[in-house]
Image (cartoon, rainbow, N blue to C red):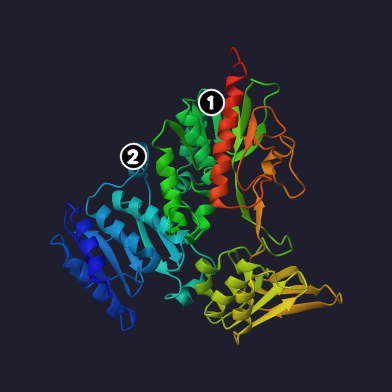
């Protein structure tokens, strides 16, 4: 199950366990049970603080729990936590065994003080790169507060349950049997939903902050770089983000980041955050900005309003909000999000094994998605708006060779249909004007990205595509407001480009600050 190299590394980690724990297996006659048994036995021999029981009574089989000796498991893995979830297993062992989690002291105390009963269930696919963050966050909470329990459920193994509960996208979290969230979350996101008083405390604390010299909105490559450059200049710097890492978190493999031959999006996002936190930067996450009021004249304060009602002031602002998946904007798309409409074939594709799916978009991303999905779905239909595919020829040839894939060109999707979940789509033949329907269970939208600039209406000039108009220095149309990265008019939406643009915008903002006079009050 585990090769010698992994065992050697795992044995080093296991030395951090300070109190005895047990792996409690609840097995059945399925083919996965022997694999779970093999895995937990291989782990147990690496530490004298890890024991095994195979008399578990957990309702989902095959599964195993992680518990302190003499206690019932608060953390369960319903399935084999390999692939993307192997790290989740290691952290569960360490945290249950008394190794302190890496969270801020105030966050740790907030988790410990939670009262009530919190039974979390998270459906995952083992190929999902977003799922581990959710699993690890809730597992950690369960390890430190006995009022919290959590089970990771492999949606492809427990397929019947996933279908019964209409799980068509991962990560998909249930709390006390009711839908809780779908998509990537971190500890702060989870706490904000289950501890309403925390949001009120955030409003008071954020609104009480002194004005910043530079406030960065967005914490992807561009925003992180801008914050670091500002902090190094000695500017009072703050950074606001819905999630640290931005689009990088949705990227699997990165092989064109110069000096690093290969990395993963989650690893790079973690490195970005770690670098920012080395400096005196006030990190406010997860927080969503809803309005920007630019300074009325050079040197005056800009105001930034947050979704929770808090208001911040700053002498300069760097907009680095990035982009998100572009939507088709047709009836049914948003209604059936996570109910058949998806945007990540790597994460959600395994849930559509043996089903009929469509891919919208004929660029590299769309054709790659169709190729990947053809390996699990019964049939894949790719719809391209133009008369020709835009993907690289080698990808087109690969797709054409697949017996269970078809390409329809000149097709405009006009509606997603269904009742409680997707059952098809309607498209128009752009040449003839005729309408056609395709019966299917899943739709993967791969038509590019849109800048996240909706909150900027009237604040700065944007193009018809929503990109922030900037000059060669990153200056927007507003005094003291600069912008960088994928949300701007700069061509070539690449990580290395965003980093350079973030540095340039920050340096330009610094130049603006030293050439203007701060308000007296």
Residue 259: percent from left, percent from top: 43, 52
Q: Which residue is mark 1?
A: 212
Q: Which residue is mark 2?
A: 109
Task: Looking at the picture, tell me which residue is in the foreground, 137 or 4.
Answer: 4
Left or right, residue 439 beside residue 169: right
Residue 216: percent from left, percent from top: 55, 35
Residue sticking out furthest to the right? 432
Q: Quadrant of the N terminus?
A: bottom left
The secondary element bearing badge 2 is classed as helix
Closer to the observer: label 1 or label 2?
A: 1
The secondary element bearing badge 1 is classed as strand
Q: Say if residue 102 shows up in the picture.
A: yes
Counting residues from the N terminus, which is met first, the one under dot 1 or under dot 2? 2
What's the residue at 73%, 60% (across, down)?
329
Mark 1 burial class by Cα count in 10 Å: few <14, some 14-19, many 20+:
many
- Please, is residue 482 above or below residue 75 in the view? above
């Amino acid at each position: 199950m585990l090769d010698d190299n992994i065992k050697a590394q795992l044995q080093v980690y296991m030395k951090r366990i300070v109190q005895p724990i047990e792996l409690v297996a609840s097995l059945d006659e399925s083919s996965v049970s022997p694999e779970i048994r093999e895995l937990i036995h291989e782990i147990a021999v690496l530490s004298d603080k890890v024991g095994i029981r195979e008399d578990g009574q957990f309702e989902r089989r095959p599964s195993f729990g992680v518990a302190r000796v003499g206690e019932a498991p608060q953390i369960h893995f319903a399935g084999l936590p390999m692939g993307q979830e192997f790290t989740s297993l290691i952290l569960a062992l360490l945290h249950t065994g008394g190794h302190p989690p890496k969270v801020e002291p105030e966050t740790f105390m907030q988790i410990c003080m939670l009262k009530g009963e919190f039974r979390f269930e998270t459906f995952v696919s083992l190929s999902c790169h977003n799922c581990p963050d959710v699993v690890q966050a809730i597992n950690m909470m369960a390890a430190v507060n006995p009022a919290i329990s959590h089970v990771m459920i492999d949606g492809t193994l427990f397929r019947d349950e996933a279908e019964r509960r209409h799980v068509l996208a991962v990560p998909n979290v249930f709390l006390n049997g009711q839908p809780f969230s779908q998509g990537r979350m971190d500890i702060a996101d989870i706490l904000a939903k289950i501890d309403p008083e925390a949001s009120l405390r955030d409003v008071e604390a954020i609104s009480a902050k002194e004005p910043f010299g530079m406030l960065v909105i967005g914490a992807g490559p561009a925003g992180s770089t801008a914050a670091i450059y500002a902090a190094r200049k000695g500017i009072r710097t703050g950074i606001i983000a819905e999630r640290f890492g931005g689009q990088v978190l949705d990227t699997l493999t990165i092989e064109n980041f110069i000096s690093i031959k290969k990395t993963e999006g989650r690893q790079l996002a973690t490195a970005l955050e770690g670098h920012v936190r080395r400096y005196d930067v006030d990190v406010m996450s997860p927080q969503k900005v809803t309005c920007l009021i630019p300074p009325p004249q050079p040197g005056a304060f800009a105001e930034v309003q947050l979704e929770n009602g808090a208001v911040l002031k700053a002498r300069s602002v760097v907009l680095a909000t990035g982009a998100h998946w572009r939507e088709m904007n047709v009836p049914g798309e948003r209604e059936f999000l996570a109910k058949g409409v998806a945007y990540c074939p790597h994460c959600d594709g395994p849930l559509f094994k043996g089903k009929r799916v469509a891919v919208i978009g004929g660029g590299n991303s769309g054709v790659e998605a169709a190729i990947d999905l053809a390996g699990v779905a019964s049939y894949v239909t790719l719809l391209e708006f133009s008369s020709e595919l835009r993907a690289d020829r080698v990808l087109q040839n690969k797709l054409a060779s697949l017996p269970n894939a078809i390409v329809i060109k000149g097709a405009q999707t006009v509606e997603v249909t269904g009742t409680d979940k997707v059952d098809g789509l309607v498209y128009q033949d752009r040449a003839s004007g005729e309408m056609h329907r395709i019966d299917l269970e899943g739709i993967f939208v791969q038509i590019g990205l849109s800048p996240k600039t909706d909150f900027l209406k009237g604040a700065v000039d944007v193009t018809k595509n929503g990109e922030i108009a900037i000059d060669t220095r990153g200056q927007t149309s507003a005094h003291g407001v600069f912008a960088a990265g994928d949300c701007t008019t700069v061509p070539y939406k690449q990580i290395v480009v965003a980093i350079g643009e973030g540095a340039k915008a920050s340096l330009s903002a610094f130049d603006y600050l030293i050439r203007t006079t701060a308000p007296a009050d």
